[in-house]
Amino acid sequence: GVIQTTGICNFGKLNYYLGARAAEEGRESRYPDINFCEQPDAICASQEHKELKWIAGMFYWVESLQSYNSDGWNYIDELKSFVDNGMSGNNFIDAVSGIVNRGCHNPPCASGSVDGSYERASNFLKVLAELDLV
C-alpha cells in the first residue's frame, strides 16, 4: 500500500473493518470478498480494486497515526502546533516518520533508527512547497 501494510494485527484490522470478516459478522464491508488475513497481497495485486493501495495506507493513517498519543506526544496536538507555527522545521515529520516506521515519536526507537529519515523529511518539504504551503 501507500504505507506498507505489515503485521498480523494490521491485516486483521483491515479484514475486521473492511474485508470478509466484517461481512461474515453482518457488518457493512467495502470488500466482502477479500480476506486480508488469507490474501494480504490483494492490497497490491487486486486488479478489480486498484484503490486498495491507497485505502490500506489511509486506513493505517487514520487508525494508527491520527490516534497516536504516547509519552506526552499527541498527533493531533502536534499537527496543530506544526501548522500554527508556519509548518517549519523537521521535528513534526521526524516524529511522524518514527511512528510510521518504528512505532515511536522520538527516534531512534527500541526497534532502531528510522529508515530514510532524511529522504522522508526532504520529500515532505517538497510536497508542502508544491502545495504552496511553505
Image: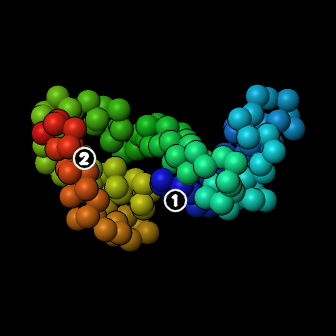
**Marks 2 and 1, how far apart in space?**
20 Å
Is any part of residue 56 visible from this angle? no
How many residues crowd around disc 2 within 10 Å: few (fewer than 14), some, or many (20 or more)? few
How many residues crowd around disc 1 within 10 Å: few (fewer than 14), some, or many (20 or more)? some
Q: Is 97 situated above or below 77?
A: below
Residue 49: % across, % down: 66, 46
Looking at the picture, which amino acid does disc 1 mark? Gln
**Residue at screen point 12% across, 39% down:** 134
**Residue at screen point 12% across, 34% down:** 86
Residue 30: % across, % down: 71, 35
Q: Which residue is mark 2?
A: 127
Residue 69: % across, % down: 41, 39
Q: Nearer the viewer, residue 122 or 78?
A: 122
Looking at the picture, which amino acid does disc 2 mark? Val
**Residue at screen point 20% across, 32% down:** 83
Q: Which of the two labelled residues, at mark 2 and mark 1, occupies the earlier sequence position?
A: 1
Helix, strand or loop at mark 2: helix
Residue 115, quarter of the rendered image: bottom left
Helix, strand or loop at mark 1: loop
Point out which mark residue 4 bears: 1
